[in-house]
Amino acid sequence: MRRIASRTVYTVIVLVLSSIAVFYAIRLSGGDALAARLPASATAEQREAFRELIGLNDAIYVQYFDYVGRLVTGDLGNSLTNNASISAMLVEHGRNSLILGVASFFLVFAIGVPLGILASVRRNTWTDGGIMSFSVAAMAVPNFWLALLGVWLFASTLRLLPSAGCCSPRQLVLPAVVLAMEGIALTVRMTRSAMLENLSQDFVRTLRAGGLSELRIVGKHVFRNALVPVISLAGLRIGQIVGYALVVETIFGWPGLGQVLVNAVLRRDYPVAQFFSLVLITVVVLSNWLADIGYTLANPRLRRT
Amino acid sequence: MPEVASDSTAISAAGAGPILSMRGLRTSVSTRDGAVDVVRGVSLDLYPNEVLCLVGESGCGKTITALSIMRLLPTPPVRVRDGQILFRDRDLLGLSDREMRKVRSEEISMIFQDPLTSLDPVFSIGSVMTEVIKTHRDVSRSVAHQMSVDILDAVGIPDPHRRINSYPHELSGGMRQRVMIGMALVLDPEILVADEPTTALDVTVQAQILEQLLEEQRERQMSMLLITHDLAIVASVADRVAVMYAGEIVEEAPVHELFEDPKHPYTQGLLRALPHASIKRDVLVPIPGRVPPPQMMPPGCYFAPRCPDAIELCWDGHPEHFDRDGRTYRCFNSQPFHQR
């Protein structure tokens, strides 16, 4: 319990610090925030007046506290470029991202863990070799390249799946698989090595001496022990998915948070960019926090300390 | 320090045959340069209701012998190459995996050296014990639970109702070994194989665990094969002793005969290397040299290179088991034992 409490405190600290970092980074990145908002014919005075109006001339820390103040009252503000409500954007694009992210996360474990177990049980056979080669390849190929290959093969050549768009199940397949691929590869390796490590532990011999069947020993005891490190890295897999979503959503025209964030940064749309950066950071930090709790629950040695 | 247990009732009643009988057991390890024997034709009998100690230096093949009986060798690379292990007229080596699983812990149980790593860390001790019971007996969960509580109580775990829900890391080393003993005995096996059960424990706890093991052995009238390198333990618990060197049994004797009149020079060396309360000695005498690696065994007696009494013959011929004057040992040139 104490461990969970201390992780929670760290989580809050990380969130506060990263909100400050995001806020400064976006404002220090140069570019004109108003280019897209005011017509090109606007005079220098008009631009200056508008900057003053929306508070861009205040010191950055003043702007920060203003922003946080409004954030905690639930006022997310509007886009600088088209005045769209950020909360409406959050609901719409957040839903799309959630669909894609959850699908990928599911694939990472639904494919990665069984493949890892299979490789460990059939270690040093062709099955193992094939799975491990696949995993090396999946880690080595960058996701944007994999995305293009996927589009070429399944959309243009075989015409099995749509190349882009949102949000039918058929449209979901390619982006979800591409997004999950590296996570699958890493999970396969993690699972395999954790299984092998635990298979050679002394307790396995004790269970054999107890007359348990090999299926029970491997399927229950070794698997549960191997799950501890795999679960503990589940949070990292979420972080990976969130990060890669920026690329994959853009390539597949999937209107999620990643796509919104990329566009906002390109247009220096401060309120949108900083809010959605914060959203993504929060997702990553919270998933790490959840993984920590999961790790604590999966590992009795940490449960009561 | 070691006082030979005076009440040890040598071998069991005349006429009773052995309960477990190893015949010419050969176990080998495959290496890059081919298979190398680490157990070289061990023949050994375990009689009902006796404590047989298997002693020898580390690496002499004691543990491999024990694991061969249980068929728990890490195969590959280690496997039984030849021989028989007869238990109730069945050769354990010929059983199917399924039949062997039934033998394990129901008829022959084994406990191991390090009780910390030998218990599954992510399950409570009760859940593993219940699982073992339910694997062998068609009983309900609550009956299995009660059996577990009872056996934990019997092997000296205080407050077993609460302790049964503990995880291994929550118990001390001694408690963990008691749990191991309980788990091994819960199905009332006829044979317990104990591989250095106290080596990883504090000295004070060692005596308690040994006492517990002996108590269970007497109460259940089971046979125990105790593997140890510690002659003090041998002196206090054994009925009979088999001394192992380089994968072979070199001497076999009832415990008091072995301590009073060791025949094989290796046994004599072991006794000289032992602190002794009744004989004042300035120095302990180590056995010179090391056990040769298994692929470089000398052609004659394996102990010849380290033996103070080796003669020409010892370098040429390999001594078989001799039965002389009621004693069994492998030596061409046994000399009377002197404390030096």
Image (spheres, coloured by chain):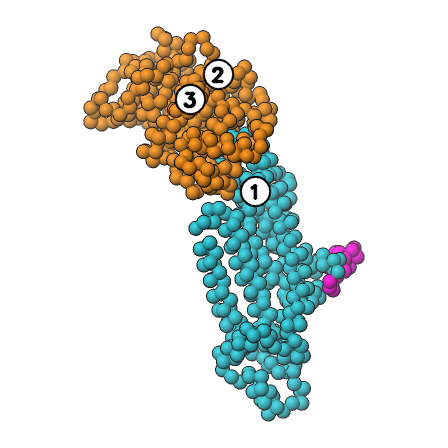
Chain colours: A cyan, B orange
Quadrant containing the C terminus of chain B in the rendered view = top left
Residue identifier under label 3: B219
Q: Is residue A204 above or below residue A132?
A: above
Q: Where on the picture, by quarter, is residue B142? A: top right
Q: Is residue A61 magenta?
A: no
CA gap between label 1 and label 3 equals 38 Å
Q: Give the chain letter at badge 1.
A: A
In terms of secondary structure, where does tag 3 sit? helix
Q: Position of residue A242 (x, y in %)?
A: 60, 62
Q: Residue at x 66, y 72 (%)?
A: A88
Q: Residue at x 55, y 39 (%)?
A: A221
Answer few, some or many: residues within 10 Å of disc 2's Cα (few below 14, many 20 plus, some between 14 and 19). some
Q: From where the camera sits, is residue B284 visible?
A: yes
Image position, residue B274 (x, y; %): 28, 25
Residue B45 in picture, x, y percent from top left: 45, 16
Q: Which amino acid is tagged 2?
A: Ile
Vertical placement of residue A83 versus B249, above or below: below
Question: Which of B77 and B194 lies nearest the eye of the viewer?
Answer: B194
Chain containing mark 3: B
Dot 3 alpha-carbon crowd within 10 angstroms: few under 14, some 14 to 19, many 20 or more: few
Residue position marked by numbered label 2 in the rendering: B19
Read off the magenta span. Answer: A149-167
